[in-house]
Amino acid sequence: MLCPATDFIPAATTEPGQTWRRENSGMSEPTTKSSGGSATLVWYLVEMTVYALFVFAYYLVVLHASRSWLKDLFDAHKAIYAVVALALIIGQVVLLELVTTGLFRLIRGNSK
Amino acid sequence: MDFPISGTHINPVALMGAGLLIGVLGGFFGVGGSFLAGPALFAFGVPMNFVVGTDLAHIVGKSIVAARRHSRLGNVDFKLGMLMIAGTIPGVEAGAQGIQYLKRNANVDQVVALVFIFVLISISIFVAWESLRTLQLGKGARFNKAHSVGSAKTNKGDVSALAGVARRIHLLQFPPMISLPRSGIEEISLWAILAVAFVGGVCSGFLGGGAGYIRMPAMVYLLGVPTHLAVGTDLFEVIISGGYGTLTHALKGNVDILIALVMQTGAAIGAKLGASLTSYLHGPGIRLAFVPLPLLGAALLIYTLITGHHFG
């Protein structure tokens, strides 16, 4: 959840004079142990489920299919493999970031 | 699932789960998460040279997400990050050459695992001692002024019992002297920054990951960078050092990119959550909460070394 409950913070580890900076965080109100908190948890689980399904599909289609190609590249052309490896991990991060951000906005928009 | 590049068989769900957990913790503490990712991969049965290279690749991706978030929160000192790159890259290469040497001449698994255990335990003990001392020493205005990290404008109330060490390092006059206004440092020798970056780079190249577990404490205690800025700047630094480390280790045949990609799918969401959590905790609080994590990684390595049992 992008608005974690303040209950998660051990009291002993907070500093004197240190208060939560909501204005800097760009996040929503902290949740409380109320029905609002339960609803938040439900939407969090929905988000996680949709994300998990997406990742599973991605895993099946992309990672499984590219396995043998990457192995051949690793064995035969280390230099190309190195560049492809870096490009793949950066590309995947950018793609996943876009998808998860869009997904979160979509689900949260619908929940409101 | 078989991962033919490293010749291992790992359950991809376990790998994604590990990535998620590491993403949350890494995003929160501002370290790449290699203090857990490395031991976890080793526990999954990945050979140590592949653990090092693959962890670096995985950390690059994860750090891009987390660093972007920290950048939005204003937690990145880009000037400091760019300067540190000059020390980090030679360090990463030195560490990678060390792995190559061990691959040819010794049991790379055992040597790297033992060094990893030593580093993780040492860091936990040190951070625990410093954080507890800071929290115990006092909460009065006099203590806060004498031990504040960075300037009053930048530190967000961050204090450290070892702030005096950083101040003494600031007094060292080895030119060229650099000013880091974002971190509240009026003047510091470039060599001090490069030395910290080089040591972090060696750890990154030799043990894998971004080595934030050593760079972040060094930035706070030795350079005097406020903790929240050390967190964000370290992540920025990890993108560069991890990118170079991935290339050099891939060229040496130490990267199984498929493992990194599967792990990263879980880490992407975890890093997002973890970075958000840093808005709730500052200074010694963050550092104290960090303490058990390297110990967990060390325990995982010790268990795998002793039993030879592999998870996943």
Image (tube, helix red, strand yellow):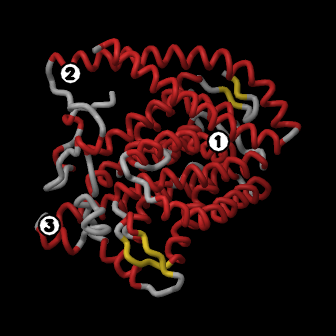
State the SS at label 1.
helix
Q: Is residue B101 left or right of residue B23?
A: right
Residue displayed at 50% across by 71% down: B193
- Type of amino acid at the residue the image marks with label 2: Gly
Q: Which residue is mark 2?
A: A37
Q: Is residue A59 left or right of residue A68?
A: left
Number of marks: 3
- Type of amino acid at the residue the image marks with label 3: Gly
Q: Which residue is mark 1?
A: B54
What is the crowding at mark 3: few (fewer than 14 residues within 10 Å), some, or many (at least 20)? Answer: few
Q: Which residue is mark 3?
A: B138
Q: Position of residue B184 (x, y in %)?
A: 34, 68
Chain under disc 2: A
Same subunit, labels 2 and 1: the answer reads no
Vertical relation: A68 (above or below) B274: above
Residue projecting furthest to the bottom: B173
